[in-house]
Every structure is written in structure tokens, then in C-alpha cells.
Amino acid sequence: MARTPSASSSRRSTRDFNAAQTRRAALSLTHSRIARGVPGKPSVRDIESALRLLQSRGALVANSATATTVNVRLLATPERIKTELGAGDELELSFLRALWRLVGVRINDGAIVDASGFPPGYGGTRGVMSLLAALQSRQFLVWTANGAGEVRLARPNHPLEYFQIDWPAIGKRRAGDVAKLDAMQKYAYLNSCRRQFVLSYFGDAAARPKCKGCDNCLGVKLAKRVVGRVAKKRRRRA
Ligand SMILES: [Zn+2]
């Protein structure tokens, strides 16, 4: 039986993910980082399905392939900045001021900043990133670039409930999908009459034990092997 993420495990990953994200507020994360951070060791598939769901509900946004956002957290106090950044550091000082104007006090907890959104004079996205690197090397701040495909909370200050996700409906749909997959596998490995199986599946009262027309009723071994192979492939893909 192929492992299909259950609604409850998906719900759990989502909840834990949300809690973890609230703590980390503005940080953006990769799937593997989320998987490592969520208790209960969810599979990558569980994580992916939870992320897809949260994205479809507008709770998460994924970075595009051309992401220019960075996560920045200020380490230095204003006093330290004042004493340690002096002559020759005018660009760094002005950059820190621009950063403060963009995100304000959130910079102390870590904030997402668009590196392409700074006023001219800092060398565009590349210049901003090299300024960040320079300031990080002097331990004024820490920063990471948001990689393509990483996800972050669309509204970090909103609880998961805000996005009104219909968990029971999702669980029902999943259960339905699992049941269909089960039936398909049973059909593939069936030794008895296939026509009878299909008719019974759809609740047809006309189902008879033998149709004398399907591969099983006719005893066609080759067809059986082919069906078995197809099912094996599907299971591997599922
Ligand atoms: Zn038959």
C-alpha cells in the first residue's frame, strides 16, 4: 500500500510548522529545513502537501525564481553602531539607516527585505547584498538571501485559523483518494472475475461470479502479468 499523507499528519505538520514559523517570524524556509524542525518526522511528501495547501489558502508565499528578498536581523545596538561605524563607513551607516526606514523595529527580530527596493546609491541588488555581507562580517547583522522556491508566511502575524482551512473536507477527500487507489491495486492483483469486481465496486446488482470474458475468466496469463507490471509502476510513482 502506497504511503499517502493522512489529513491528521498533514494538519499536525501544518500546525507545528505554523508554530515554528511564528517563533522565527520572518525567516524563509526550505522543505528540508521544515521537515527537520517539525516533531514526529513527517515525510517530505507530507510537508509538500501541507505547503501546497497553505499556499493555496494564501497563508504562504513561495519565492519566485528571481527572488531578490533577503532576511536580515540586526545584531548591533544603536550605541555600538554609533561607536564602531565612523569615518570611512559612511555608506554602511547610511545603508543601516535606509534599512531601518524600510522595516523599522522589526529588524531586531529579523525581517524580510527586498534588496531591489533600496534607494539608488547602494549599487542595486548586488550592492545591497555585498553591503549586507560586509556588515555581517563585522557582526552588525546576520542575513541570508531567500532562495528560489523557499516559502515564507504571507501574514506572519495572523494565526492559522485566519485562513479558514476546511480540515474535515480535506480529510474526506484524502480518504476518498486512498480508497480509489486501494481499489485500483486490488483490481490489478485480482485473480477472480474483473467484470464482477467492477460491477460490485459500483454497486451493480447484476454482478455475477464469472463473466467468461475477462482475462481471469479466460485464464490469460500474459495480460495478468502486464497489468501487474503497470500496477507496480503506479505504486512506485504514487
Ligand atoms: Zn470475468
Image: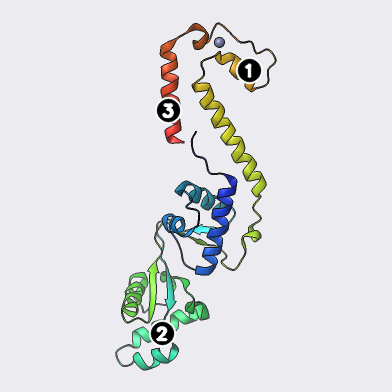
In x, y percent, where is residue 82?
39, 92
In x, y percent, where is residue 126?
33, 70
Q: Earlier in the sequence, mark 3 or mark 1?
A: 1
> Mark 1 sits on what residue?
199
Compare residues 209 and 139 and report the one nearer the observer: 209
> Mark 2 sits on what residue?
76
Compare residues 47 and 64 and report the one nearer the observer: 47
Does the beta carbon of the residue at mark 3 sit less than 8 Å from ligand 1? Answer: no
> Mark 3 sits on what residue?
232
Q: Earlier in the sequence, mark 2 or mark 3?
A: 2
Q: Give neighbour class at mark 3: few <14, some 14-19, many 20+ (Cα, 10 Å).
A: some
Residue at x-position 49% and y-position 39%: 3
Q: Give neighbour class at mark 2: few <14, some 14-19, many 20+ (Cα, 10 Å).
A: some
Pointers 1 and 2 in contact (C-beta within 8 Å): no
Left or right: residue 216 versus residue 140 is right
Applied colour scheme:
rainbow
Residue at x-position 39% and y-position 72%: 143
- The CA distance from mark 1 to mark 2 is 72 Å
Does the beta carbon of the residue at mark 1 sit less than 8 Å from ligand 1? Answer: no
Give the foreground label among 2 and 3: 3
- Toward the right, the furthest residue is 205
Q: Quadrant of residue 162?
A: bottom right
Compare residues 35 and 123 and report the one nearer the observer: 35
Q: Quadrant of ligand 1?
A: top right
Residue at x-position 49% and y-position 58%: 38
Say what secondary structure mark 2 lies in. Answer: loop
Pointers 2 and 3 in contact (C-beta within 8 Å): no
Residue type at mark 2: give it: Ala
Q: On screen, 230 above or below 49?
A: above
- Toward the front, the furthest residue is 40
